[in-house]
Image: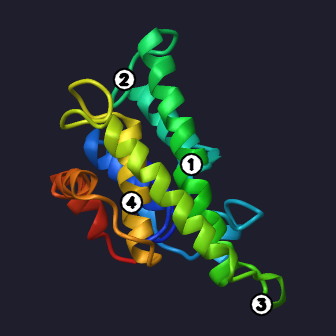
């Protein structure tokens, strides 16, 4: 049995959604970033963390890759060109969407007031919009890669959802409808309704 550490409205949602998609049971310990509870599992207080026996895994994308490889689900096989293409998209999403959203969060509420530069957020929003446009152009079917759900689908959807909550400009209709189709998945709904 896995245990996910972190509030549903954080990157922990990615891990919970993935566990729901692959049909793995898990416990959920809801806690905020940098809380005393979070620091029990990760000294930095960053979430999510995943308890696997005596091991504590950190970083949402690393956890997702671990689960994908362990259960042979939502991923192309390791060591294949298809996996390299999947990883390339995953790393692009981290660089071009997730990192931009995280930078905006740091300048909104994470950094101490005296370290925040609110003016940077306009450029971050423009950069995110550019990346969302590129992703929309790439989207050709129901999924970002091939004909089945993979880790990048979960990551991209979470980033789009995060952008909505952060007050970023709306993505185009094509990408917006695609993200809605992802949110309509039973596994997404099951994870999203977990108690915090």
**Above-or-below relation of 103 to 65:** below
Do labels 4 and 1 touch, CB within 8 Å? no
Residue drawn at (40%, 37%) of the image: 151
Q: Estimate how packed mark 3 is, as few (under 14), some (14 to 19) or many (20 or more) residues with alpha carbons within 10 Å.
A: few
Question: How many discs appear?
Answer: 4
3 or 1: tag closer to the N-terminus = 1
Q: Estimate how packed mark 4 is, as few (under 14), some (14 to 19) or many (20 or more) residues with alpha carbons within 10 Å.
A: many
Residue 158: x, y in percent? 40, 57
User: Where does label 2 land, which residue?
Assistant: 72
Q: Residue furthest bottom?
A: 113
2 or 1: tag closer to the N-terminus = 2
**Above-or-below relation of 51 to 79:** below
2 or 4: tag closer to the N-terminus = 2
User: Where does label 4 land, which residue?
Assistant: 160
Side of 182 relative to 54 (left or right): left
Residue drawn at (26%, 54%) of the image: 179
Residue 45: x, y in percent? 70, 68
Report the disc number at residue 34. Answer: none
Residue 127 in view, yes or no:
yes
Report the disc number at residue 96. Answer: 1
Side of 18 relative to 109 (left or right): left
Q: In front: mark 2 or mark 4?
A: 4
Q: Estimate how packed mark 1 is, as few (under 14), some (14 to 19) or many (20 or more) residues with alpha carbons within 10 Å.
A: some
User: Where does label 3 land, which residue?
Assistant: 113
């Amino acid at each position: 049995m896995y245990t996910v550490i972190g509030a549903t409205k954080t990157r922990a949602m990615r891990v919970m959604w993935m566990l729901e998609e692959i049909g793995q049971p898990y416990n959920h310990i809801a806690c905020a970033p940098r809380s005393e509870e979070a620091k029990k599992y990760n000294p930095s207080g960053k979430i999510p963390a995943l308890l696997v026996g005596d091991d504590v895994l950190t970083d949402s994308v690393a956890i997702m890759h671990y689960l994908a490889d362990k259960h042979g689900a939502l991923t192309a096989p390791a060591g294949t060109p298809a996996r390299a293409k999947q990883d390339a998209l995953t790393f692009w999403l981290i660089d071009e969407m997730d990192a931009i959203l995280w930078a905006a969060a740091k300048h909104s509420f994470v950094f101490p007031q005296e370290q925040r530069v609110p003016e940077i957020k306009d450029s971050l929003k423009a950069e995110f919009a550019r990346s969302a446009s590129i992703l929309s152009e790439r989207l050709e079917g129901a999924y970002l890669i091939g004909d089945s759900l993979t880790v990048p689908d979960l990551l991209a959807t979470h980033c789009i959802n995060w952008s909505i909550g952060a007050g970023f400009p709306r993505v185009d209709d094509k990408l917006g409808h695609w993200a809605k189709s992802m949110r309509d998945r039973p596994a997404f709904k099951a994870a999203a309704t977990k108690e915090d």
